[in-house]
Amino acid sequence: MNPSSHRLSVKSQPPQGLVAPVECAGVGLHTGTVTRVKILPGAVGEGRYFVRVDLPGCPVIPARFDAVHQTTLSTELAIAEASVRTVEHLLAALMTMGVEDARIEVDGPEMPLLDGSALPWVEAIAEVGLVPTIPGDRPEITPLSAAVSVYEGDAFVSAIPSPELRFSYGIDFPEPAIGNQWHSWSPSQSSFVTDIAPARTFGLARQIEQLQAAGLIKGGSLDNALVCGETGWINPPLRFPNEPVRHKILDLVGDLSLLGPLPLAHFIAYKASHKLHIQLVRALAESRVQI
């Protein structure tokens, strides 16, 4: 199966189901813990959910916005004492490939970062194959009826009515190698797999010691994240000239998947974060504009 064939559109392919389980393992970005993941086909209507198979009773954590526990440099879901962190890359891959129902078993507190992008996930999913779970075309995406926005200082995330599903993002960093970048992606016009999924997570060299002192990025390395210094990238080459902002779109798509079916809208973000992404998801859910 060619993963680059998967695109979202206003009236797209039927929901897809995994033909066989998908298995991956690797280190978590923040915890530094090595975890193993098995993604199994879910029953139609169950949605996407995580299962902590290492904990007593194998607690279930739904991939829904109301299970978001914290958003510090990644999105963490939790139910009671069970949690799973850095879920956004896998969820972006599943949503854009049409996998609406999936049981994601993980034996630790954080998803593997793999190479820092969503590409290993989409390749692993494509390797086992997908089949439609419901005959016929998916119903048309419901248009957004009114704009919804959330702000924090000069950072914002908005959803505005649009004739097509589109994601646009802007970032601005003092490091010259990053600077001000914008990218816009419409899944009806180009593939998530080729245009967004390969974009890796990135960090700033000047922040590494501070983040490590805060107990974060214990599993980060030059093999799974781009690192930018004052004079340029420490571990080039980049996969795209604007790889950082493309990765921000990847994160946004993964976080928006926690809403469930997306409304037909143009999602626009500037200097945003997982925190603002989730605030927009909650605002959309509360106003019921996604229905």
Image: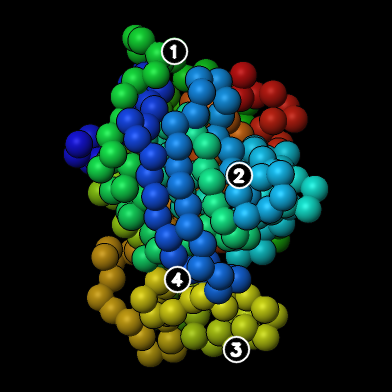
Q: Is residue 264 above or below residue 140?
A: below
Secondary structure of the residue carrying numbered label 3: helix
The CA distance from mark 1 to mark 3 is 49 Å
* N-term-proximal mark, 1 vs 3: 1
First-in-chain label (3 vs 2): 2
Do the CB atoms of the residues marked 4 and 1 lie less than 8 Å apart? Answer: no
> Foreground residue, 115 or 272?
115
Nearer to us of marks 1 and 2 is 2
Disc 4 to disc 3, how far (Cα)? 15 Å
> Mark number for residue 209?
3
Q: Nearer the viewer, mark 4 or mark 2?
A: 2
* Label 4 sits on residue: 202
Label 4, residues with CA under 10 Å away: few <14, some 14-19, many ≥20: many
User: Badge 2 is on which residue?
Assistant: 51
- Can residue 181 be seen in the rendering of this structure? no
Q: Are marks 4 and 3 in contact (CB under 8 Å)?
A: no
Give the quadrant of residue 188.
top left
Which amino acid does the dot numbered 4 rest on? Answer: Phe
